[in-house]
Amino acid sequence: MTTVLPGHIAAQNRRARHDYFIVSELEAGIMLIGTEVKSLRAGKGNVNEAYAGPMKGELYLFNSYIPEYQSKMPFPHETRRPRKLLLHKREMARLMMAITKDGMTLVPLDIHFGNRGIAKVLLGLAKGKKMHDKREAIKERDWNRDKARLMRDKG
């Protein structure tokens, strides 16, 4: 069983940068219970379909999947429960305003463990991409790859 060390990523949303323009990134704490932390340290977890949004005046992470820990604990956790995000009031107010007024989305980019071993979520304040934007990004990435290949062969 592999364990995730401090400073390493436990779960990553690779699709987010393809589907959204990331305007800014912000690191937030996440409120977890013991078996969720153990599951994340084991490298299990998925934030591909997750998003963050307001609930009861706070920001929560919805639809993130953290499976039950392998050893049968007497009280297992819910796998897709809303998890509270820990932010400063100013940061929370700024993000809530961006979500409601500007029509932006809060997308979790990854869950990682900080230097002190505490679970953190890297949130991206994002604006959705249209299909033609995605095609343009793919064309640009392919051209840069071909250009690098040509420069390497010629130079």
Image: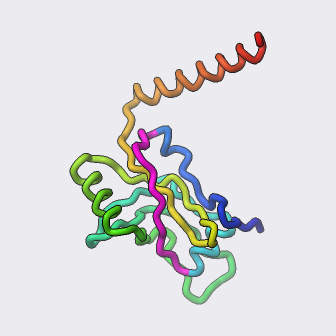
Residue sticking out furthest to the bottom: 74
Residue range highlighted in magenta = 19-33
Q: Is residue 16 above or below residue 28?
A: above
Identify the residue at image location x=43%, y=43%.
Answer: 22
Q: Quadrant of the C terminus?
A: top right
Residue 7 colored in magenta in the image: no
Q: Residue furthest left?
A: 101
- In the image, what residue occupies the spot 47% across and 75% down? 31
Looking at the image, residue 147 lies above or below residue 38: above
Closer to us: 35 or 99? 99
Chief secondary structure of the magenta span?
Answer: strand
Q: Residue at the spot x=32%, y=68% of the render? A: 89
User: In x, y percent, where is residue 108?
Assistant: 47, 55
* Magenta segment includes 27: yes
- What x and y, as percent, mark residue 11? 59, 58
Horizontal arrangement in the rendering, residue 39 relative to residue 15 (left or right)? right
Horizontal side of 141 relative to 71 (left or right) equals left
**What residue occupies the far top of the structure in this picture?**
154
- Residue at the location (45% across, 40% down)? 19
x, y percentage for residue 18?
Answer: 49, 38
